[in-house]
Each structure stands twice: as C-alpha cells, then as structure tokens.
Image (cartoon, grey):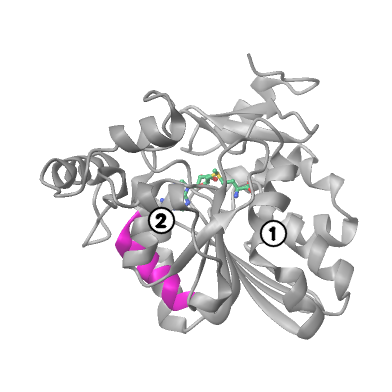
C-alpha cells in the first residue's frame, strides 16, 4: 500500500480538483522522495524505488548533459511529460554543478497544469537548491521563467500537438527526456510518428533518454531514424534506452536486446494523424502483430528470461 507520510490525500484532492483534471495521490518512494499515483492512467509517476534517483539515473546521466555543460556556455533541454519537474530539476542541478554560468533553455511539455503546481505546493522541489526551486515554482505558476542562467517554458496540452509547434520553431535540444506513462497506458507518446517529431528536435550530438526498454519503443525509435542503446538499470533489473542521431554516439545493443527486436514484441505503435485515442493505437498494433512475419516472442522469453511470464514487453 502507498505510504502517505504526513501528507493528506484530501489536501491533494482539494488542490487538484480546483479544475477538471486527473485525480492523483501522493506516494512516498524508497529514496525518501515523493511522487504521485495517477488513478486515470493506473500508474505511478515514478519508480517506487526512488523518484529522485530515477530522474538522475534514468534521464540526466544517460543524456550526458554534464559533459555538454563543461564544453558549452549554453544548452537546450526538451522535457517531454514534465510532471512534477524532477527531471528538469535534477538536470539543472548537475549542469550548474559543473558550469554555474551555463545558460539553459528548457522546453517542458505537460498535459496537466495542476501536476507541477501541486508538487510545488507540497514543497517537494525544496530538496533541490533554492536557485532551482524558485524558478521552477515560477514556471509552474506562470508557465515561463527567465533568469540570467535559465529560460524555461511550460507548454500545456497534448504533447503530440505541442511538439509539432516546437518542431516548426526549429528547436535543437542537447538532451531530450521522454517520460510518459508506460506504452500500454499512454501509447500516443510512444509512436513512430511522435519519435519522428522528437528526432527533428534533437541536436546532431544530442541524446534522448527514456526509462523504457520495450522492444516496441526501441524498434519505433529505430524506424524514426535513431540509433539506440541500453542505459544502465536504476532501481530495477531492466535497463532504460538512450537514442542518438549518429551511430558513434551509442554502443551496440546487447545480443539479448537485438534478438528481442527480431520478435513481434518489436512491432511499434503507430498514429499517422497524431489524433488517435490510446485504445485505437493499441488495437492497431495488435493487428499488425497478428499479421507480422516476425517470430513469436515466446522463444525469446524462454531463451533469455527462462520464464515466459517475466517478459519486459510483448
Ligand atoms: C510518468 S509522469 C512524468 C513524470 C515527470 N517526468 C517528473 O519528473 O515528475 C507522466 C506525465 O505525462 C503527462 N501526460 C500524460 N499524457 C500526456 C500527453 N498526451 N501530453 C503531455 N503530457 C502528458 C501526465 O500528466 C504526467 O505528468
């Protein structure tokens, strides 16, 4: 059961129901940091092993933003599914540790304005330095912030549409954090078409990081023109994924992961119009899997996991 600590669920509901929005509940993760659980998506916003740990280990470290910050006076971040803002907060902390004067431009995409506001209201960003908490509180409240070292924009709406607008602005991010709810729950943001938009926003030497190691996600990224590799596991056995535009930026996938891509689990999600509902996207993929010449995933599971019920993806 979730541990709510000193936090009152009713208090959150009161805040989050001031407008039509997703009901969420607070959840204490194993590293002592809080996250939300979404009733609508049926999932936690972060891994139970640690929300802060996840931000750093699955997003900031794999994008190698600190390497970038040591060599550049400015950089650009695209945070897809900003949520509580932990990924951006962790990135700013690491960037300014190595280069305090680095100017960071953040584009943060999020559906629900109430989520970052609620995280700020509960003081959850106060575990980062005030130089980060204060501007991110302003960002949650006014959707933009400007300081001598930070320009940030919180763009509200379905990321499929808001990202299209950013592509037209020609943004080039050194780091992209891709952090939607899981592919079966939020397939809209794991499609080949969405990845193609992300590819256009990535700087030539930039890196995209996501927590997912699903074959459908990796195959979709490859089809969209990325090179992919594993990022180290954080708080669980499965690795995440890093994607880049050039092969030299990434190590080859493990044999296990390469063979996973030869199975029907690697049929990607598709959404040609960028408008389809989650159920339609899931159903379209199931149909493509049924007609696919790719091998069933069962043999792969037996070979690598020794247990057909323990697959990371189907
Ligand atoms: C897994 S949480 C992200 C956690 C976040 N990165 C953080 O550090 O707190 C997923 C987020 O995606 C948002 N979301 C869901 N569907 C979306 C959509 N179609 N477009 C943009 N954001 C979406 C949810 O409101 C939620 O905040």
Q: Is residue 88 left or right of residue 37?
A: right
Q: Quadrant location of the N terminus?
A: top right
- Mark 1, Cα crowd under 10 Å, few <14 / some 14-19 / many 20+, is many
Mark 2 element type? helix
Give me the residue at 69% from left, 79% from top.
75
Q: Nearer the viewer, mark 2 or mark 1?
A: 2
In three-dimensional space, the C-alpha distance between marks 2 and 1, rounded to whole angstroms, equals 19 Å
The numbered mark at residue 218 is 2
Mark 2: few, some, or many residues within 10 Å (few <14, many ≥20)?
many
Q: Which residue is mark 1?
A: 60
Q: Nearer the viewer, residue 232 or 280?
A: 232
Q: Which residues are magenta?
A: 191-201
- The numbered mark, 2 or 1, whose residue comes first in the sequence reads 1
Measured along the vertical axis of the image, is residue 17 above or below residue 192? above
Q: Position of residue 63 (x, y in %)?
A: 64, 65
Q: Is residue 284 left or right of residue 9?
A: left
For residue 192: magenta? Answer: yes
């Amino acid at each position: 059961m979730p541990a709510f600590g000193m936090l009152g669920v009713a208090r959150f509901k009161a805040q989050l129901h001031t407008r039509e929005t997703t009901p969420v509940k607070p959840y204490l993760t194993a590293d002592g940091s809080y996250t939300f659980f979404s009733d609508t998506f049926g999932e936690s916003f972060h891994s139970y092993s640690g929300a802060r740990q996840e931000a750093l280990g699955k997003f900031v470290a794999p994008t190698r933003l600190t390497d970038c910050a040591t060599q550049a006076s400015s950089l650009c971040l695209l945070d897809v599914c900003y949520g509580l803002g932990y990924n951006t907060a962790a990135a700013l902390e690491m960037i300014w540790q190595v280069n305090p004067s680095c100017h960071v431009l953040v584009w943060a995409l999020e559906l629900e304005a109430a989520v970052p506001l609620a995280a700020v209201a509960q003081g959850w960003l106060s575990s980062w330095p005030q130089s980060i908490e204060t501007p991110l509180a302003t960002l949650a409240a006014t959707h933009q912030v400007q300081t001598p070292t930070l320009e940030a924009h919180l763009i509200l709406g379905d990321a499929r549409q808001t990202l299209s607008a950013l592509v037209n602005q020609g943004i080039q991010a050194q780091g992209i954090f891709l952090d939607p709810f899981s592919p079966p729950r939020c397939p809209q943001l794991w499609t080949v078409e969405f990845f193609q938009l992300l590819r256009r926003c990535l700087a030539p030497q930039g890196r995209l990081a996501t927590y997912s190691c699903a074959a459908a996600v990796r195959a979709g990224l490859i089809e969209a023109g990325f090179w992919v590799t594993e990022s180290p596991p954080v708080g669980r056995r499965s690795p995440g994924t890093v994607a880049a535009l050039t092969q030299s930026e990434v190590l080859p996938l493990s044999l296990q992961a390469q063979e996973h891509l030869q199975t029907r689990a690697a049929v990607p999600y598709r959404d040609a119009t960028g408008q389809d509902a989650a159920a339609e996207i899931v159903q379209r993929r199931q149909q493509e899997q049924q007609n696919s010449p790719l091998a069933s995933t069962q043999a792969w599971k037996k070979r690598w996991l020794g247990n057909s019920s323990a697959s990371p993806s189907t």
